[in-house]
Image (cartoon, rainbow, N blue to C red):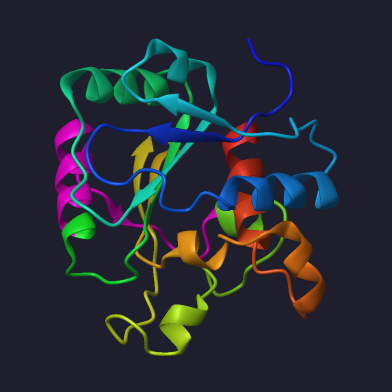
Amino acid sequence: MISDFVFCTGRYESGDWDSAPSLPANLIDSVARYTGIAVAPSGAIVPVGSEAILEYPLVYMTGHLPFRFTDAERRNARTLVERGGMIFIDDHNHDIGGVFHKTAMEEITRSFSQPKDLPNDHAIYRSFFKFDDGPPATSHELNGWGDNLVHKNLQAVLHGDRIAVLYSSKDYSSEWNYHPDSKRFSTVDNTRFGVNIIVYALTR
């Protein structure tokens, strides 16, 4: 088993899995900066079709293009969550009618069950930082770029009372895809909710 937390990006065969290459370093920096979690300084890119993916408690996936699992990827994803792991899938298109959203929702439903709106008072919104209104909005939503909507909820598939698959239409992948050094220019660090996701995945 892995001792330090390693941020894992899941590489899947369809689509553009590597569309947010700076995000892992930024969230790793945030975990090290704010928490006492022992975190590896570099993330890992792991094929979802490899059984090596089962070693990671949290797997992040994103993209713009159609999202489909192969049979091996689907089998490993199911095994991962059955063993207590969590998958976080974020639509990098920040829209609700795009091809990533449509195919990801179909694939999540096929592989697990239909995602449901996650209540905005769920424990993930207070697992480290407190977000009283649920998922923080992204600048893309607030600027009206994309579908001109602020998505009020994230969606989730639960395994018992635990989030097994967390899905976002909010495009955190664009919001968090920058070098950690850029945080000094921000009044509020917008990666804080990413810390919550990681802490939740490690403690549930």
Rendering coords of residue 161 (x, y %): 44, 38
Can see residue 160? no
Is residue 122 magenta-colored? yes
Q: Which residues are magenta?
A: 102-123
What residue sits 18% from the left and 41% below the top? 107
x, y (%) of residue 16? 31, 47
Q: Residue at x 22, y 56 (%)?
A: 100
Does 151 sit above or below residue 195?
below
Residue 150 counted in the magenta span? no
Residue at 35% x, 17% y: name it. Answer: 79
Q: Is residue 186 above or below residue 195?
A: below
Q: Is residue 187 visible?
A: yes
- Image quadrant in which you'd find residue 113: top left
Left or right of 5? Residue 112 is left
The image quarter containing residue 80 is top left
Q: How many marks?
A: 0
Q: Residue 9: percent from the left, percent from the top?
A: 48, 36
Q: Quadrant of the C terminus?
A: top right
How far across and how far down the image is residue 148, in percent? 31, 87
* Front residue of 17 and 3: 17
Q: Residue at 27% of width from left, 81% of height from top?
A: 147
Quadrant occupied by the N terminus: top right
Of 148 and 64, which appears nearest the observer?
64
Question: With 146 as the anchor, is 10 left or right in this view?
Answer: right
In the picture, measured across the screen, residue 127 lies left or right of residue 176, that is: right
